[in-house]
Image (cartoon, rainbow, N blue to C red):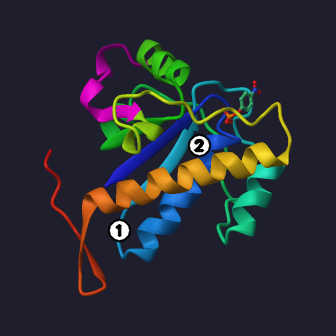
Amino acid sequence: MRILMVCLGNICRSPLAEGILQHKAAKAGLQWRVESAGTGAWHAGEPPHHLSIKVAGLNGVDISNQRARQFVQEDFLHYDFIYVMDSSNYIDVKHMSGTLWNESKIDLLLNELHPGENRAVPDPWYGKEDGYHKVYEMIDKACDKIIQKHTQEVRGTKYELRSKR
Ligand code: 4NP
């Protein structure tokens, strides 16, 4: 599986989503590629926000080596699935993707937990540290659901289910 996590700046939410899902996939023995991008280019080349790095680190996930990049339409060719953090990311990706837009390959991350409700992972960028902890928890639960969806546990060992696509 190749999964891309997308938010606006690629410095707060999607780096957490990348780090968390990478961590869980590795723990489950899955050979997945999980990366992230932002619809905006303001922070391209920068590491994640220091509070995202801090909160991830407190949870045993190191995201300090990540570097931001902007989403490009070819990402639809290079990934099996794209998760966005909120509806405005979804609309932005749609506008940026032209003919490569593929509705069957994209969804809001929290729709894994609350199907069809289009709930947002709120942008913690303007707030304090507690916002980053809240966002971490939401993303963590959604990523558990993703792993669960793609694996079957037999006597304590997780096996990857074959893709339906
Ligand atoms: P993110 O948060 O989309 O979770 O990375 C933001 C980071 C930076 C900006 C906006 C959102 N910004 O406007 O620079």
Tag 2–tag 1 contact (CB < 8 Å): no
Regarding residue 47, the answer to whether it shows in the image is no
Residue 100 image-quadrant placement: top left
Report which residue position mark 2 lands on.
14
Above or below for 97 versus 146: above
Residue bearing mark 1: 31
Which three-letter amino acid code belongs to the residue tagged 2? Ser
Q: How far apart, in angstroms, are the residues tagged by discs 2 and 1?
A: 20 Å
Query: Which secondary structure, mark 1?
Result: loop
Q: Residue at x 34, y 41 (%)?
A: 81
Q: Which corner quadrant of the figure contains ligand 1?
A: top right
Q: Among all residues in the image, which is located at the extreme bottom?
A: 155
- Numbered tag placed on residue 121 in the rendering: none
Q: Amino acid at mark 1?
A: Gln
Number of callouts: 2
Does residue 136 sit above or below 107 in this rendering?
Answer: below
Q: Write the start and end of the magenta stretch as one range.
A: 97-107
> Is 146 placed left or right of 64 in the picture?
left
